[in-house]
Image (cartoon, rainbow, N blue to C red):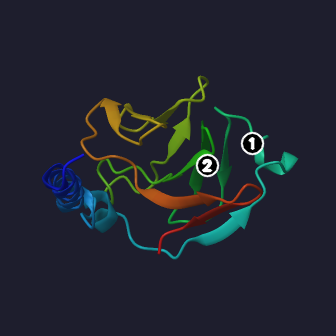
Amino acid sequence: MKMGSSRNLILFFLTILFLTCNLGCGKENPVDKLIPYVLVNFSINPNDINYNNLNIPGNWTYVSGGYRGIILFNAGFGDYKAYERTSPVNFPNDFECRVNVDESGLIAVDHCSASKFNLLDGYPFEGPATLPLKQYQTYFDGQYLHVSNF
């Protein structure tokens, strides 16, 4: 490979990295400003029976924490999602509305507005919702699932 080709390839990847970060890194989700901040920082063992066999892909459980509770969802391949249960639709006017996981186990529903959210990414796909669910950071170290918002 010629030196010029290597340099062009490196510049190409650096450009892609720069564009990716400019388009997505550090951008705040509007729902983060809507739903009040509450410190989230805990760890669980997904193998624990108390967490609905969360170690199995597609399984989910509710846990306390966040503003009004959290949904933990195993998206498979070691990827876990943590969503705030406070509905972003009409908040704070409909303070009592929480999202609940439906019988399929893949969809969260706000029964007050009939909005539905995909648990793989938190985004709405039905109903009046325009914002995704507030999401917390997760990290699975092979034994424990760590959830935080810092």
When asked about the image quadrant of residue 20, the answer is: bottom left
Q: Amino acid at mark 2?
A: Leu
Q: Can you say whether 112 is above or below 144 in the image?
A: above
**Where residue 122 appears, x then y in whole percent?**
41, 42
Residue drawn at x 53%, y 65% as measured from the top left: 66
The residue labelled by disc 1 is 55
Question: Which numbered disc covers residue 17?
Answer: none
Residue drawn at x 58%, y 49% as measured from the top left: 71
The residue labelled by disc 2 is 72
Instruction: Report helix, strand or loop for mark 1.
Output: loop
Farthest residue to the top: give it: 104
Farthest residue to the right: give it: 49
Q: Amino acid at mark 1?
A: Asn
When asked about the image quadrant of residue 57, the answer is: top right
Specify whether 28 is left or right of 85: left
**Where residue 105 appears, x then y in whole percent?**
60, 29
Could you give the CA–CA distance between mark 1 and mark 2, rounded to whole angstroms?
11 Å
